[in-house]
Structures are given as C-alpha cells and as structure tokens.
Image (cartoon, rainbow, N blue to C red):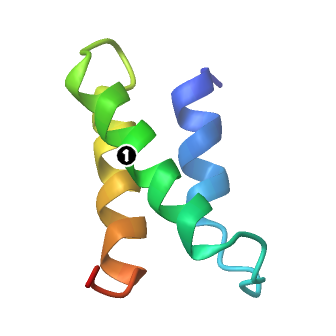
Amino acid sequence: MDEGSRLWALIDDQDDRLPLVTLGEARAVVALLQALAAGGGPDTGLADELAARFARRLPAEE
C-alpha cells in the first residue's frame, strides 16, 4: 500500500471525533494543505480534499 492509499484509509476511518486543535491551528492546517495542493505532486488531490473537508467544518471568519 502506497503512502497516499494509507492516508486515505486513515481519513476514511469513521472513529469518534475528538477536539484536538484550536480554531487557529485548524485554520493553519487548512492553509498548509491548500499550499501543498497548489504545489503539485503525487498527493495534490489528497491535500486538496483534506483542505476542503476541514474548511467546511470551520466557522466562517469574521
């Protein structure tokens, strides 16, 4: 199993959600994933999908 497949398996795991990060940390993760997605490479789709999933769960910035 390649790294991308292993990461997808972790992402698709439907275990209980835990509050592990602050709002600011979550926004930073989304920005980092968006930068990774923009950079190209083999895991661009994975980074883009994760950024979108996380961004949808964040409250709108004021």
Tell me: residue 32, above or below residue 15.
above
Q: Position of residue 48 (x, y in %)?
A: 29, 44
Mark 1: secondary structure: helix
Q: Report which quarter residue 36 is drawn in.
A: top left
Tell me: residue 22, above or below residue 39.
below
Q: Is residue 4 left or right of residue 57?
A: right
**Residue at image point 67% right, 54% down:** 10
Instruction: Give the position of the C terminus as an image quadrant.
Output: bottom left
**Residue at image point 49% right, 51% down:** 28
Q: Where is residue 18 in the image (x, y as percent from the top left)?
A: 78, 83
Is 52 in front, or is 20?
20
Is 15 in front, or is 52?
52
Residue indicated by mark 1: 31
Instruction: Give the position of the N terminus as an image quadrant.
Output: top right
Q: In this view, does 58 lie to the left or right of 40?
A: right
Tell me: residue 20, above or below residue 11.
below
